[in-house]
Image: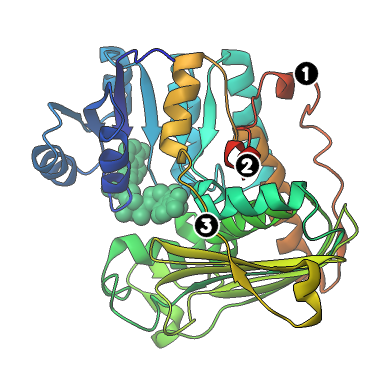
């Protein structure tokens, strides 16, 4: 594949932006040429620190300047929709942070606009591209675990308990995540899309019904800090049925003391089981299958490196073809998340009809699912 140089525009220079700059700059031929943020002090300091030659405080000015080949959008959740719709006018490929939008109708509008613009449009659902996830998916495809009966997925954070990521009581980057008026849909809206994505990707089964319970715990006097009403959910528990016949539990919380940013996924089938753990960029995969099912013996499995989402996006830009995880995939997952909110409100399970207005036929023919290459070699 050609090493065509790619000049990236970075939109949003808050906490996650550094991750984008560090990962993109490791890719040969890629550079971040300008940053955009509405907070001048922040964008100036960020661009100075990371030696990014140009900065803007207005996205329109950056688009009018136009000297970039692709965009990475790292703005807050509620800002993805307006910024992506504006950026699509310039017909440049976009990697957008997750969740694509705070609701399915907005995510669908973005997906359809990207299709009309004919550009590569991907979402940073980065956990599915961890080596352990890719290896686990290949093992499932190879039939190692048989027919999957049960899925157990958890996403564990504790920034409401510990100060390891700063103080949520005083820092804007945490306060907006706790406030519906600032576009947050709580932990379900924040990491729900990650956990649904990697669980359904590894198991190769999509939810067909969802029953969700949300909980917002009291955290401050009057449930408010300054302009931030603290009404977004902190914990969710969800039970799902899947189209391959499995049932499962999917849950997450910001109160999971002892874990900064951890994930656990277990998949149990008629012939075997596999378990993945991930914590702060360390990870492992183990399986219990074959004769080991009679003795409950688990064996660690090595997972060779695979391209991460940043590399996938650049590969997609160079090839001119969207790879997964695409806007379309993120919109389908957002449909499930919207139903989960509704299920909590109604106190009942709801069926998931497969996002009917997402055209899953033709456009997806142009979406190259990254083949689980690793797995072929195992
Ligand atoms: N994929 C992942 O693993 C992962 C991890 C962390 C965060 N995220 C996502 O990344 C996004 C950003 O999160 P963060 O922690 O960096 O938030 P943050 O609040 O630290 O940073 C967001 C930045 O965007 C800026 N901004 C707001 N409106 C803007 C606009 N209209 N134009 C340009 N800039 C604007 C803010 O001033 C701020 O500097 C969120 O959507 C979050 O869900 C993803």
Query: Local crowd at mark 3 within 10 Å, few (<14), some, or many (≥20)?
Result: few
Q: Which residue is mark 1?
A: 362
Q: Residue at x 65, y 31 (%)?
A: 369
The numbered mark at residue 330 is 2
Q: Position of residue 7 (x, y in %)?
A: 28, 20
In this view, which residue lies farthest toward the front?
291
Disc 2, SS: helix
Asked whether 172 or 329 is in front, the reply is 329
The answer for how far apart the CA atoms under marks 2 and 3 are is: 29 Å
The answer for how far apart the CA atoms under marks 1 and 3 are is: 36 Å
The numbered mark at residue 194 is none
Quarter assignment of residue 148: bottom right
Asked whether 255 or 308 is in front, the reply is 308
Question: Cβ–Cβ below 8 Å for labels 2 and 3?
Answer: no
Q: Which residue is mark 3?
A: 302
Please determine whether, in this image, residue 253 is positioned above or below residue 56.
Answer: below
The structure's colour scheme is rainbow
Q: Residue at x 30, y 15 (%)?
A: 5
User: Which label sits in the foreground, 1 or 3?
Assistant: 3
Screen quadrant of the C terminus: top right
Q: Please indicate whether residue 82 sits to the left or right of residue 195 in the image.
A: left
Q: Position of residue 327 (x, y in %)?
A: 60, 34
Q: Position of residue 375 (x, y in %)?
A: 63, 43
Asked whether 86 or 282 is in front, the reply is 282
The answer for how far apart the CA atoms under marks 2 and 1 are is: 17 Å
Quarter assignment of residue 33: top left
Q: Earlier in the sequence, mark 2 or mark 1?
A: 2
Disc 3, SS: loop
């Amino acid at each position: 594949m050609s090493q065509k140089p790619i000049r990236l525009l970075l939109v949003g220079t808050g906490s996650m932006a550094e991750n984008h700059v560090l990962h993109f700059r490791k890719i040969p031929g890629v550079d971040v040429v300008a940053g955009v943020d509405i907070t001048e002090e922040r964008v100036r300091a960020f661009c100075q620190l990371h030696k990014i030659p140009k900065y803007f405080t207005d996205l329109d000015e950056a688009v009018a300047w136009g000297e970039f080949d692709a965009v990475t959008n790292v703005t807050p959740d509620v800002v993805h929709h307006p910024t992506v719709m504006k950026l699509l006018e310039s017909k440049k490929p976009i990697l957008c942070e997750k969740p694509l939008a705070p609701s399915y109708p907005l995510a669908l509008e973005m997906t359809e606009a990207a299709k009309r613009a004919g550009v590569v449009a991907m979402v940073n659902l980065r956990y599915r591209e961890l080596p352990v996830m890719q290896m686990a998916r290949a093992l499932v495809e190879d039939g190692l675990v048989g027919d999957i009966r049960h899925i157990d997925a958890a996403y564990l954070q504790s920034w409401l308990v510990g100060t390891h990521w700063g103080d949520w009581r005083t820092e804007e980057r945490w306060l907006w995540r706790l406030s519906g008026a600032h576009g947050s849909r709580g932990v379900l809206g924040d990491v729900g899309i990650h956990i649904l994505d990697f669980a359904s990707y590894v198991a190769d089964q999509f939810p067909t019904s969802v029953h969700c319970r949300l909980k917002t715990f009291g955290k401050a006097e009057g449930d408010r800090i300054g302009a931030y009403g603290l009404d977004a959910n902190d914990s969710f528990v969800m039970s799902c049925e899947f189209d391959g016949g499995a049932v499962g539990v999917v849950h997450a919380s910001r109160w999971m003391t002892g874990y900064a940013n951890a994930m656990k996924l277990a998949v149990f089938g008629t012939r075997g089981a596999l378990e993945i753990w991930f914590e702060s960029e360390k990870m492992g995969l183990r399986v219990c299958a074959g004769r080991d099912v009679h003795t409950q013996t688990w064996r660690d499995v090595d997972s060779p490196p695979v391209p991460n989402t940043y590399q996938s996006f650049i590969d997609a830009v160079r090839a001119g073809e969207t790879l997964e995880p695409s806007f379309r995939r993120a919109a389908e997952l957002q449909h499930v998340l919207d139903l989960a909110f509704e299920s909590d409100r109604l106190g009942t399970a709801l069926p998931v009809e497969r996002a009917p207005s997402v055209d899953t036929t033709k456009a997806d023919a142009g979406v190259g699912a990254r083949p689980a290459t690793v797995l072929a070699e195992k």
